[in-house]
Image (cartoon, rainbow, N blue to C red):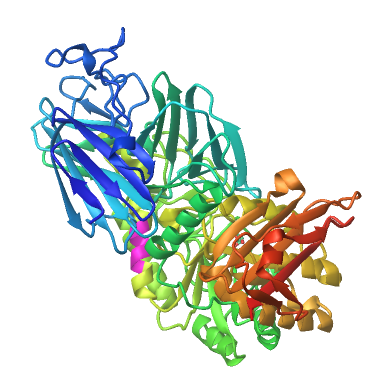
């Protein structure tokens, strides 16, 4: 059992970590410790003998207990804890937003409970349930810790039940809260913008309150919910590293506050884009947040997350080989023509590409981004014999077929909008703002979700589609659901996500054999909520390999390579230059490989190169999908990105060195492959050269090139 409940102590153990809370006087669970495994006598003491002025205390226990300076498992607004707190609940009748949830009982069980309507982690696990009650509001708080022993991950969420006769409104909801001791910490966050999402930044955590958040109705290109808090001296291989993420795809808040008594770390829905009315008898479930710890540095914390995402979040696709697609977008954009598409499919099949994906522009009046979105009917002029017949013809070329959809959005110039202008997010009297000429459908309205189910069902019924690319191309403004009653308008964004997840679940049941790739203008919803339903995610619309390395490097902190869909494109003339084509490919094998250019316009030799690339990629695809990933060089700091991947017994190793800057001084980089087994001999599968594990551990020397775009990879197998 990884959970132990004693009268004065509750502890959670995972393979390599320990989490302990102490029961003060048997009634107040206080956070004591989270970190590497230590013995009982090494656990810190709670400093209850040091009362502080200005810290409110309970009459009954005297000055020694104050919510202001005890470490909490969860904290409540307005009752003596002056730090950022996790839960703020308004009693609408009295106008008070003060609560004091008192601990009532703890129990544990194997497995976990379902979080209704929301995505959550699954697999072999145990759950700790703490139950609290607030006497005045007569509400009950259920705090859940789901423990994934093997991957060193603890997942947290809460359920709030209104048992009384008052109406309550949740004003702030944080799913995970962790109080760490005072110390010198750095924050690693994944920030960016459209086309440059998830660049890794490391900043010192200074005193005060730091908020990483999205108010966009999506997890966003700009601030990803994943972050790490690491010891100031931690590096890839050593030091304390804590990593956090949120299993949710909408607006979020990661809040980190360094104050007089240490560091409070929280992740949740926050307090800006969310409120929730709880009527008598109703309950609310927060989305789940997850955390891990490693004493072996930032790299191991990433690998913990990778293992967890692969085993507990992603659809069961671990060992399945992935499609290698040719996508039509960068080749023709909206200019879809049936014969050209068939020619693409035919040429692609000859190279070993196994799936042709027809992107945007195949339905309704969608000849550009100004019209047709929302009308899920194949355009008759483009497909006179219908979509089914066209797909049959694609298959007859010996290739699978994939198609693009964007169900959550609508162009005002569409039949759907003309029929239902009330089905988009809009506030009262104002015209909703456009973005990419589109409006956001009110997914908080079940009627809209049901309509989409019917419409997609009808469109793809009986058609053998092997792959869907589910896109979402704008953020929410005027984020008010016309459907929800006035007192529930603050629930719009949360209920929007419930609607989206409902549609995803339906879609996966309806088209069980098709693989789903997620996309939001590239990686605008690159999060654990989307990963629950999508095998992989289009990492970024930026396919320029030189810039892409930053995005892939940043993404690797929290997300496994198997999620990172990577295409070789012609955006910088790569297909006209063999060396660039090779560089682009070396960059793209950081995740499931694909291609995206006009295959009818390239020289025959390019197709020969692609065939060889595919053969090479397939020879080590399993490593990319399942291997242990080690970062070696950071493109922002080192002018190059380097990493290696090994299988679990270190008998196979893939190493990549990818330059993103020209280096006139031709710096010599040493890539140390720490996980190579010193006693083994490894054969380079291209040159057949043998290198000992000891030599790999000492490092491969690589000289930087004067060209900006230069990359080299090595694939070794143990003899
Ligand atoms: C944004 C995506 O990221 C692109 O790959 C493409 O699918 C377009 N949308 C289509 O509108």
Between 322 and 347, the one lying in front of the other is 322
Q: Which residues are magenta?
A: 501-506
Quadrant location of the N terminus in the rendered image = bottom left
Q: Residue at x 30, y 28 (%)?
A: 45
The location of residue 352, given as percent across then percent down, is 66, 85
Judged left or right of residue 428, residue 147 is: left
Residue 6 visible from this viewpoint: yes
The relative height of residue 575 versus residue 295 in the rendered view (above or below) is below
Residue 647 pos. (x, y %): 54, 70
**Position of 572 compared to 406: left or right?**
right
Q: Is residue 504 magenta?
A: yes
Quadrant of residue 31 in the image? top left
Quadrant of ligand 1: it is bottom right
From this view, report whether residue 406 is shown above or below residue 188.
below
Left of 225 or right of it: where is 395? right
Q: Where's residue 253, x and y in %? A: 43, 37
**Quadrant of the rendered image containing residue 59:** top left
User: Which residue: 72% across, 67% down?
Assistant: 586
Q: Nearer the viewer, residue 683 or 171?
A: 683
Can you say whether 150 is above or below 682 in the image? Answer: above
SS majority, magenta:
helix
In the image, residue 443 lies in the stretch drawn in magenta: no
Q: Residue 205: where, in percent of width, then height? A: 53, 29
How many marks are shown on the rendered structure? 0
> Foreground: 15 or 289?
15
Query: Is there any visible trace of residue 417 in the rendered image?
Result: no
């Amino acid at each position: 059992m990884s959970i132990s409940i004693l009268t004065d102590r509750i502890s959670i153990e995972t393979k390599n970590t320990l989490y302990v809370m102490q029961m003060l006087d048997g009634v107040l669970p206080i956070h004591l410790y989270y970190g590497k495994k230590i013995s009982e006598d090494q656990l810190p003491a709670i400093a209850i003998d040091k009362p502080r002025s200005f810290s409110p205390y309970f009459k009954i226990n005297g000055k020694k207990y104050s919510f202001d300076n005890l470490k909490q498992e969860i904290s409540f607004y307005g009752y003596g804890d002056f730090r950022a707190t996790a839960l703020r609940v308004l009693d609408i009748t009295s106008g008070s937003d003060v609560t004091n949830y008192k601990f009532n009982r703890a129990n544990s069980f194997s497995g976990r409970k379902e979080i209704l309507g929301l995505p959550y982690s699954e697999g072999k696990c145990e759950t700790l349930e703490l139950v609290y009650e607030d006497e005045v509001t007569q509400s009950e708080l259920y705090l859940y810790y789901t423990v994934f022993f093997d991957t060193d991950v603890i997942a947290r969420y809460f359920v709030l039940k209104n048992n009384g006769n008052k109406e309550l409104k949740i004003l702030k909801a944080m799913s995970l809260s962790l109080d760490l001791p005072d110390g010198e910490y750095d924050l690693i966050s994944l920030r960016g913008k459209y086309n440059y999402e998830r660049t890794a930044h490391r900043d010192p955590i200074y005193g005060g309150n730091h908020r990483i958040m999205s108010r966009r109705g999506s997890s966003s290109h700009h601030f990803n919910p994943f972050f790490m808090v690491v010891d100031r001296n931690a590096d890839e291989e050593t030091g304390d590293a804590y990593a956090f993420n949120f299993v949710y795809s909408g607006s979020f808040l990661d809040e980190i506050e360094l104050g007089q008594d240490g560091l409070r770390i929280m992740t949740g829905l926050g307090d800006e884009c969310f409120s929730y009315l709880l009527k008598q008898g109703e309950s609310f479930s927060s989305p789940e947040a997850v955390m891990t710890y490693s004493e072996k540095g930032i790299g191991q914390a990433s690998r913990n997350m990778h293992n967890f995402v692969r085993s507990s979040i992603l659809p069961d696709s671990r060992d399945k080989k992935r499609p290698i697609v040719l996508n039509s977008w960068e080749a023709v954009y909206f200019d879809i023509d049936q014969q050209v598409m068939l020619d693409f499919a035919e040429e692609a099949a000859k190279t070993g590409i196994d799936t042709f994906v027809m992107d945007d522009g195949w339905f309704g009046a969608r000849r550009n981004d100004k019209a047709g979105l929302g009308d899920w009917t194949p355009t008759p002029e483009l497909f006179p014999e219908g979509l089914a017949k066209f797909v049959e013809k694609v298959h007859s070329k010996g290739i699978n077929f994939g198609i693009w959809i964007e169900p959550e959005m609508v162009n005002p110039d569409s039949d759907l909008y003309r029929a239902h202008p009330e089905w988009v997010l809009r506030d009262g009297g104002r015209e909703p703002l456009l973005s990419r000429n589109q409006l956001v459908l009110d997914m908080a309205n079940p009627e809209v979700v049901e309509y989409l189910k019917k419409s997609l069902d009808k469109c793809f019924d009986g058609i053998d589609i092997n792959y869907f690319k589910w896109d979402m191309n704008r953020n929410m403004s005027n984020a008010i659901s016309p459907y929800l009653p006035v007192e529930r308008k603050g629930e719009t964004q949360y209920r929007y996500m419930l609607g989206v997840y409902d549609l995803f679940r339906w879609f996966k049941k309806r088209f069980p054999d098709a693989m789903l790739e997620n996309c939001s203008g590239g990686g605008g919803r690159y999060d654990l909520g989307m990963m629950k339903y999508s095998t992989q995610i289009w990492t970024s619309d930026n396919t320029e390999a030189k810039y892409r390395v930053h995005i892939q490097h940043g993404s690797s902190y929290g997300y496994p390579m198997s999620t990172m869909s990577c295409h070789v494109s012609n955006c910088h003339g790569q297909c006209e230059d063999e060396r660039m084509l090779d560089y682009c490919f070396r960059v793209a094998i950081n995740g499931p490989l694909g291609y995206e250019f006009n295959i009818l316009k390239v020289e025959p030799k390019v197709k020969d190169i692609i065939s060889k690339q595919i053969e090479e990629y397939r020879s080590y695809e399993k490593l990319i999908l399942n291997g242990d990933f080690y970062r070696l060089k950071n493109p922002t700091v080192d002018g190059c990105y380097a990493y290696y991947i090994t299988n679990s017994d270190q008998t196979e190793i893939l190493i990549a060195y990818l330059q993103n800057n020209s280096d006139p001084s031709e710096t010599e980089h040493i890539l140390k492959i720490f996980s190579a087994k010193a006693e083994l001999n490894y054969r380079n599968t291209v040159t057949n050269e043998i290198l000992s594990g000891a030599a790999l551990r000492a490092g491969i020397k690589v000289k930087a090139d004067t060209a900006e775009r230069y990359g080299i990879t090595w694939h070794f197998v143990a003899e």
